[in-house]
Image (cartoon, helix red, strand yellow):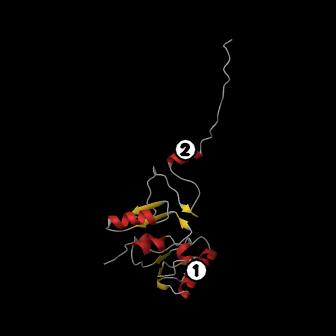
C-alpha cells in the first residue's frame, strides 16, 4: 500500500506567485498531455491555484520533465534498467541534485557514477543537504560552489600587503 499523509493545515496547495505563472504551468501540463503523457491526477487551475498534478510517462525531453516549472507538478517516468534510468536522468540540460531510491548498493553506485548532477542522495530526496558539504550543480544548474568553505571565500576580500624591508632608524 502506498499512502501520502498530509497534515490538514497544508492539505490544499497554496497559490502560485501569479495568475500568469499558474496559466503557464497549466499550459505546460496541457501540452505534455497532448504530446502523449497521461494525466494521473490534477492539472486543473482556478485563478492562481493549480491542483497538484501527476504526469505519467511524458517524453523525457518534454518541458514538463526537463525544465523547472515552479508548480505543484511531478512527472513519473518508467525505466527498464539502470542504464536506461541514467539515460533518462541525464536527458536534461540541468544537473543540480538527484535522489536515488534502491535496495541495491550496485545500482546506487552505478547511478551515482552515471547521473550528471552535483549531488546524488541515495535513499533520500534530492533536496537533502549537509551544510558542511560543498554544494553545486553541473550543466546549466547554477554557477560556482556553495558551502561554508566557499561562502567564507566569497565573502572575504583578499588583500596582499607587501613591505619593503629597510634598516631600522
Q: Which residue is mark 1?
A: 28
Residue nearer the viewer, 40 or 165: 165
Specify the farthest residue to the top: 169
Residue nearer the viewer, 6 or 131: 131
Residue 50 seen anywhere in this rendered image of the structure: yes
Where is residue 153? Give x, y as percent.
Answer: 57, 44
Residue found 55% across the figure and 83% down from its top: 32
Residue found 48% across the figure and 86% down from its top: 38
Q: Which residue is mark 2?
A: 152
Quadrant in which residue 6 is drawn? bottom left
Residue 15 seen anywhere in this rendered image of the structure: no
Residue nearer the viewer, 115 or 34: 115
Q: Quadrant of the N terminus?
A: bottom left
Residue found 58% across the figure and 60% down from its top: 142
Q: At numbered mark 2, what does the secondary structure look like: helix, strand or loop?
A: helix
Where is residue 54? Give x, y as percent.
Answer: 47, 80
Q: Is residue 27 left or right of residue 86?
A: right
* Mark 2 crowd level (few <14, some 14–19, many ≥20, 10 Å Cα): few
Question: On screen, 160 above or below 63?
Answer: above
Q: Earlier in the sequence, mark 2 or mark 1?
A: 1
Amino acid at each position: 500500500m502506498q499512502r501520502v499523509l498530509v497534515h490538514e493545515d497544508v492539505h490544499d496547495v497554496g497559490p502560485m506567485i501569479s495568475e500568469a505563472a499558474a496559466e503557464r504551468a497549466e499550459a505546460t501540463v496541457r501540452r505534455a498531455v497532448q504530446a502523449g503523457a497521461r494525466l494521473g491526477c490534477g492539472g486543473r487551475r482556478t485563478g492562481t491555484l493549480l491542483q497538484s498534478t501527476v504526469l505519467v510517462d511524458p517524453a523525457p525531453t518534454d518541458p514538463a520533465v526537463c525544465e523547472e516549472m515552479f508548480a505543484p507538478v511531478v512527472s513519473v517516468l518508467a525505466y527498464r534498467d539502470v542504464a536506461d534510468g541514467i539515460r533518462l536522468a541525464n536527458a536534461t540540460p540541468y544537473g543540480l541534485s538527484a535522489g536515488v531510491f534502491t535496495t541495491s548498493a550496485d545500482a546506487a553506485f552505478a547511478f551515482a557514477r552515471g547521473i550528471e548532477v552535483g549531488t546524488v542522495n541515495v535513499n533520500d530526496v534530492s533536496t537533502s543537504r549537509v551544510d558542511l558539504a560543498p554544494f553545486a550543480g553541473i550543466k546549466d544548474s547554477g554557477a560556482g560552489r556553495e558551502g561554508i568553505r566557499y561562502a567564507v571565500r566569497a565573502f572575504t576580500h583578499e588583500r596582499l600587503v607587501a613591505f619593503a624591508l629597510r634598516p631600522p632608524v
